[in-house]
Image (cartoon, rainbow, N blue to C red):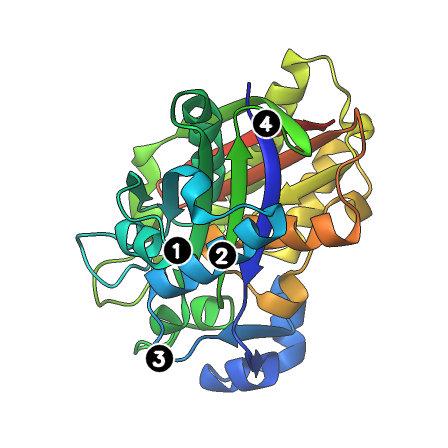
Amino acid sequence: MAFIREFGCWLPEHVVTSEEAGSWVGCDAEWVRNVSGIEERRFAPETDTVAEIAARAGADCLERAGMGAGGIGLVIVASGTGERAFPGPACTAARLLGAAGVPAIDLPMASAGSLFGMALAARLAPAYGAVLVIGAERMSRVVLREPREKGVAILFGDGAGACLISPDAGQAEIVDSVLASDGAFAEDLFLENGAPLKMNGRSVILHASRKIPAAIRSVLHRHSIPAADVQAFLLHQANQNLMDKVAATLGVAPERFFSNIRRYGNTSSASMLIAACEWRRQEGFRAGAPVIFAAFGAGFHWGALLARGV
């Protein structure tokens, strides 16, 4: 068994409005809002590294959990924007947290990385003890690379989210997860070192709008839970229109899908945990109520995780 004990997050102070982002690619803020639901996003200072912002989110999570770094048995950091090919940010983030010597694993995955990290942590926590899962991204560095593309430059922001998964107690039990990958579509969304992000937006939206609901239905079906009984859906914040489409496919009111993309944009692998952190502060787990986490990202990688409040 494994439990979600707490969430944490960190977001930069600098706000970039959709008016400003739209001006980079010759479109107005209304167009940006219509195609994405984004009104603003945050950009970190250029001097901040992925490891540093990861450690800030991790520290926030540990503080909220009332636990010191000495209680961590394993650190997992998901990021697609690390500054180096190797080592990845996980070992540095662990050191900055005061967990030097604790095993640290990098998941170089965009968008779905935190979901995969949570699923792995649920299996590893019984062996390693408390696992700190962090998603951290510096997408502004990608957005600002020339040439700036209309379908990319308006979408992304910076931030980090964290989740502490315990083997013995927490706010919710992790019940099950469904994960999948398909490398046949790797060329539809990729980022080479130092190059602009390349995205076939039509393909990404098409596959995400089908695969996310299918994964959610699969994990719910295993446990005979109707989608209507789910307390909240905490998704990777990729696009508001996509989240609304997933809600419609599942026959669930869109208000059940927590959304903060309007304020932060798409923060890739950090977004689901940032959303979970804010949802936890506003609402939180209800005893016995199922909650779904889900994501889709480059690879393609996708999946869903079922938790239940205790």
Q: Which residue is mark 3?
A: 46
- Which is more N-terminal, label 4 or label 1? 1
Any mark on residue 214, and which? 4
Discs 2/3, front: 2
Please tell me whether mark 1 sits on a helix, a strand or a loop: helix
Query: For the residue carrying disc 3, how many other residues have a C-alpha within 10 Å: few (<14), some (14-19), or many (20+)?
Result: few
Instruction: Please name the amino acid that badge 2 sits on.
Output: Ala
Please tell me whether mark 3 sits on a helix, a strand or a loop: loop
Q: Which residue is mark 1?
A: 97
- In which quadrant of the rendered image does the C terminus lie? top right
Query: For the residue carrying disc 1, how many other residues have a C-alpha within 10 Å: few (<14), some (14-19), or many (20+)?
Result: many
- Which is more N-terminal, label 1 or label 2? 2
Seen from the viewer's position, the closer of residues 128 and 174 is 128
Q: Whole-Å distance between the Cαs marked 1 and 4? A: 37 Å
Instruction: Please name the amino acid that badge 4 sits on.
Output: Ala
Instruction: Please name the amino acid that badge 3 sits on.
Output: Glu
Q: Pointer 2 and pointer 1: residues touching (CB < 8 Å)?
A: yes
Please tell me whether mark 2 sits on a helix, a strand or a loop: helix
Residue displayed at 55% across by 51% down: 61
- Which is more N-terminal, label 3 or label 1? 3
- Which is more N-terminal, label 3 or label 4? 3
Viewer can see residue 19:
yes
Residue displayed at 79% across by 36% down: 252
Q: Whole-Å distance between the Cαs marked 1 and 3? A: 21 Å
Discs 4/2, front: 2
